[in-house]
Image: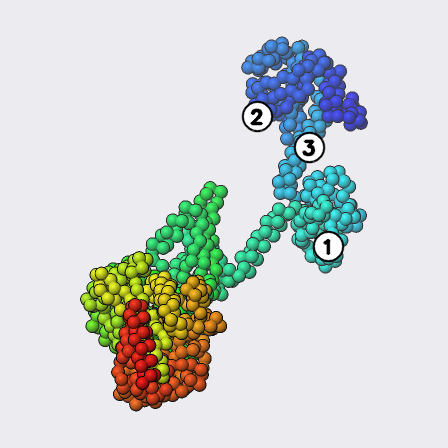
Amino acid sequence: MKNVVISDFIALPTREIRSQWVLEQIYQKLSPTHCFIGKFVDDNTVKSSLHLKNGQVVNNISYPLEGTPCAEAKKISGVCCYPIDVQRCFPEDIDLNKLAIQGYMGIAIRSFNNEVVGLLVCLFDRELDESQLDKQWFTDVSYLLGVEISYELTSKHQSALISKLELGEELAKTCIIEWNTVTDDIIHSEQIYSVLGLTPHTLVTRKKLMSITPQRDHAYIENEINQVLVDGLSHFKFNIKVINGENGFKYVAILGRLGIDKITEAPILQMVLQDISEIYHINQALYLSNMMFEHTIEPVMITDKDNRIIQVNNAFVSCSGYSIDEVIGQYPSMLNSGEHGAEFFQDMWQVLHQEGCWHGEVYNKRKSGEIVPVAVSINEVKNESQEITNYIAVFKDISVWKETEKKLSFYANNEPITGLYNRRAFLQRLEQDSRERSLQPFTIAYIDIVRFKDLNDIYGQDICDQLLEFVGQSIKSIIEGSDLACRYGGDEFVVKLTNLNINQSEKIVRKLLDICDKPITINHLLIDIHICVGLAHYPESAKKIPDLMRAAHHAMHSVKYEELSSIGVYDAQLHQDLLRDLALREKLKLAIKQQELTVYYQPIINVRENKIEKFEALVRWQDEDYGFISPDEFIAIAEKSNLIIPLGQFVLEQSCESLAKIHSLGYGDISIAINRSINEFRYDNNQVEAISTAAAKHGLSHQHIIIEVTESVAMSSNLHAKNVLNELRAHHFKVSLDDFCTGYSSLSNLMDYSADILKIDRTFIRKLLTEDKNQILTNTLIELAHKLGMSVVAEGVEEQEQLDLLRKLNCDYIQGYFYSPAIPIEQCLDLLSYFDKNTRQQLTV
Ligand code: C2E
Ligand code: CA
Ligand code: CA
C-alpha cells in the first residue's frame, strides 16, 4: 500500500482516531465532497458512523439501502464506481439529488471471513475521471477499516458473552478458576471474590486460597487434589469450608478436571467453584429434621392432601407393628379400632379444618389386634397458596397413663377391702342409671352384718376385714350383668338388682343368706355371722333414690334384731313405720326445744341391805298425738338425727336437780345412774365438763353420779370414749356397763373395761330360771366382777324367784318391776320413805 503507512495506522491510539485518519487520507487523495463509513442498522438501513464533508467531520446520516449505489457496492466484491450521472442511474436515491451528487465510488468493508460489515463511500459533486482513480488503494484502505470493524464487532460480541457469563456466574454463585500447577499461576473470573467472600481485586494465589480454608481441612484438600495430579483421576468434585468473617463459614463445592496448558503444556486444574452455603444450610436443617423425625420417640405419621400415608418414622413402625411398606399409600383408618363412631371422626375433621389442628385421645389398633389408647395431635400443612398439602399426626402411647387413671379411678370409686364400689360412686351410678333407664324396675337390697361392732371387738380388725371381704365376695357371686354392689358403710352393703320383682329379688338375696349362714373359717377360727337384708323396690317403695335407700334401710332395721339372718321387705306397714319415724323426729325436735320430755327414775335396790341405793334416770315422752312413746323408739331416732345431744343434756340437768332434791330430804347417800349413748361421746361434746358443771350447779359430789354406757362404748377400740370414761372415773364419777350379756359380751374383755358397775341385761335375767347355763354364767360373772372390784346390778327382775336366786348368787343390786318401774320424782320420794320404814321395821323386828 503505497500511500498508507500501516505502522502509522496501528500507532494511532483508538479505533475512532484510526477511522478518522483513514477518511482524512481518502480526502487528501480523492477530495470527495462526502466521505463516510456506513454501517448496517438492519438489512435495508445504513447509518454513517463517521462522516466527512469537504474534509470536515459532520453529523452522521442514515438512509435506506435499496435503490442506491451503496446497494450495488454491498453486492459486488470490488470497487463500485459511477464516475458520472449517478443520479440518473439511481433515480430513487433522493439523497443523491438533494446533495447534487455526480460521481460515486463505494466499496463493501469486509471482515476476516469475508462478511460485509460496512461500506466505505465517497460522493462527488463533480464528474470523475475513472482512469485517475486508484481503486487498488481504495480497496486496501477498506481492508484496514474491515479489520477495525471486525475487531469492534468481535470485542462487542465477546464482552456481551462475558457479561452473560458473569451474570450466569452471579446467579449460580459460581466462578471459574484455572490453576497452572507448574507455574502456580491462577486465572479466575471476577465472581471469585463473591463466591469465596474475598475483598474485590485481591490477588488470588494458591497461598491465599489455602489461607481462607480452616487449617484442619488442608490435608483433606491436598488429598483431593492429589487424587487428580498424582493418581490421574480426570475429574474431581469435593466440598470445602471457607472461613467467612469471625465465626461463620461459607460452603463451596469444587467441580473440576485436569487439563493441559496449550502453550506451556503444563497440567492445569480447571475448576468451577460454587457457593453452596444456602443449600448446605437447608440440607443441614433437613438433615436435622429428618434425624428428629426418625429418632423421636413419639410415633409420627405424614399423609398427603388426600390423607394417604406417605411417611412414618421408626417409632411408628415399632408402635403400630406395621412395616413402612405396609403403611405407605394406605389410609390412617387402617389403625381404626372400631371404638369410635363415625360422628367422632366427623367432629375431628371439622375441628382440624377450622383450627388447623386437632388434639385428642383415640384408641388405635396395632397390627397384632391389640387396642391401645393414644393421645394424638394432627396438624395441617399448607403451601403458600393456603392449600392443604399434608397432615402430620404425632401419637403418644398413653396406655400407662390410662392404666394409672383406671387404678386411680378404681381407688376413687371402689372400696379397697372388698373391691366393690364405694358409697359415693355407687350413688352416682344409681342416679345416672335411673336418669338413663328411668322406666326399668329394680330392687335395692340393704345388707347389714348383725353386731359387727361386737365381732370387731372380739376378733380384731384384721379378721373382720377378712369377714367383710368374704361378704363382699359372696355378694359378687349372687349379682350379675347390670347389677351394682357397694360397701355402703362399715358393715353395710347395698346392692341394686335390676329387672327383678320383689319376690325374685328375695330369692337372689336368700342365696346370699345361705352362703353367709354357714360358719366361716378365717385364720383357723370358725366364725358365725348373721346378716340381715332390707329390700325396697322401684317404683313401688319409692320413686327417688334417697327415699328408696331410706326405705331399704328401714326394712333392714325392721329385722335387724331377729335372732337369725332374715330379710325385711319394705311394705305398707314399714312405710307407715318410716313415716312415723320421720314424723317423730320432727316432733322430738320440738319436744326437746319446748321441754316436753320428763325424766322418771327407777330404783336400784341393794339386795343385802334391802335398801334403795340408786335410781336410774329414764327419759319419758308423752306426745299429745302419738301418746306414750317408748325411749327405745325415740332414743334411736335421736341418735340418728343428732338430737341425742340436747336430749342427753336435758336428762343430765333433770337428774341432777332431782338427786339434789332427794339429798336435801335426808337421803344423802343415794346415787343417780344416767344413760349415755355412744353418739354422745364425741370430741365436740365434752362429757366430763358437762357432767362436772351439772354436778357443781346442784352441789352434788361426783361419787353419786353414775354414767351408764353399753359395752361397745367402753371397749378399748373406741379410744376416745374409753378415754372419756377413764377421765370421768379420775374425776370420781362412777361408770356402769349397761346391757351386759347381750350380743357378744366377752368375759375375757371384762378386765379391760374401766367400769365400777356391771349391769346384767334383762333378756338374760328373764331366762335365768329356765336355762341352767344362764345361772352358771351369772354365777361366774358375779364372781369375776367382784374380783375385779365391780359391783353387779341385775336388770329386769320381775319375780321373787329371780330375786332369791340372784341373792343366792351373791348379786349386789336388783332393778326391776318386782320393786318398781321408773316413776316420777315425787313418787320416788314416797318410795324412799316407804323403804325406809320397812327396812327399819325389818331391822327392828
Ligand atoms: P336401759 O338403759 O336398759 O333401761 C332399762 C330399761 O328396762 C327401761 O326401759 C326400763 O323401764 C326397763 N325395765 C326396768 N325393769 C324392768 C323389768 O322388770 N321388766 C321389763 N320388761 N323392763 C324393765 P325404758 O325406760 O323403756 O328405756 C329403754 C331404753 O331407752 C333404756 O334401756 C336406755 O337404753 C334408753 N334410755 C332411756 N332413757 C335414756 C336416756 O336418758 N338417755 C339415753 N341415752 N338412753 C336412755
Ligand atoms: Ca340403763
Ligand atoms: Ca339395760
Specify the amino acid type for callout 3: Ser
- Reading the image, the residue beneath label 1 is 217
Q: How is the image coloured?
A: rainbow
In the rendering, at what x and y percent does residue 831 appear?
30, 73
Q: Earlier in the sequence, mark 3 or mark 1?
A: 3
Residue 14 found in image quarter? top right
In the rendering, at what x and y percent does residue 364 appear?
41, 62
Quadrant where the N terminus lies?
Answer: top right
The residue located at (69%, 50%) in the rendering is 241
Specify the amino acid type for callout 1: Asp
The residue located at (39%, 76%) in the rendering is 737
Q: CB atoms at circles 1 and 2 under 8 Å apart?
A: no
Mark 3 falls on what kind of element? Answer: helix
- The image shows a total of numbered marks equal to 3
Q: Is ligand 1 closer than 8 angstroms to the Cβ of mark 1?
A: no
Name the foreground residue: 375 vs 776: 776
Left or right: 394 with respect to 177? Answer: left
- Reading the image, the residue beneath label 3 is 155
Name the foreground residue: 726 vs 136: 726
Q: Which mark is residue 181?
A: none
Name the foreground residue: 693 vs 48: 693
State the CA–CA distance, disc 1 to disc 2. 60 Å
Specify the amino acid type for callout 2: Asp
Q: Earlier in the sequence, mark 3 or mark 2?
A: 2
- Reading the image, the residue beneath label 2 is 43
In the rendering, at what x and y percent does residue 640 appear?
33, 65
On screen, residue 107 above or below 767 = above
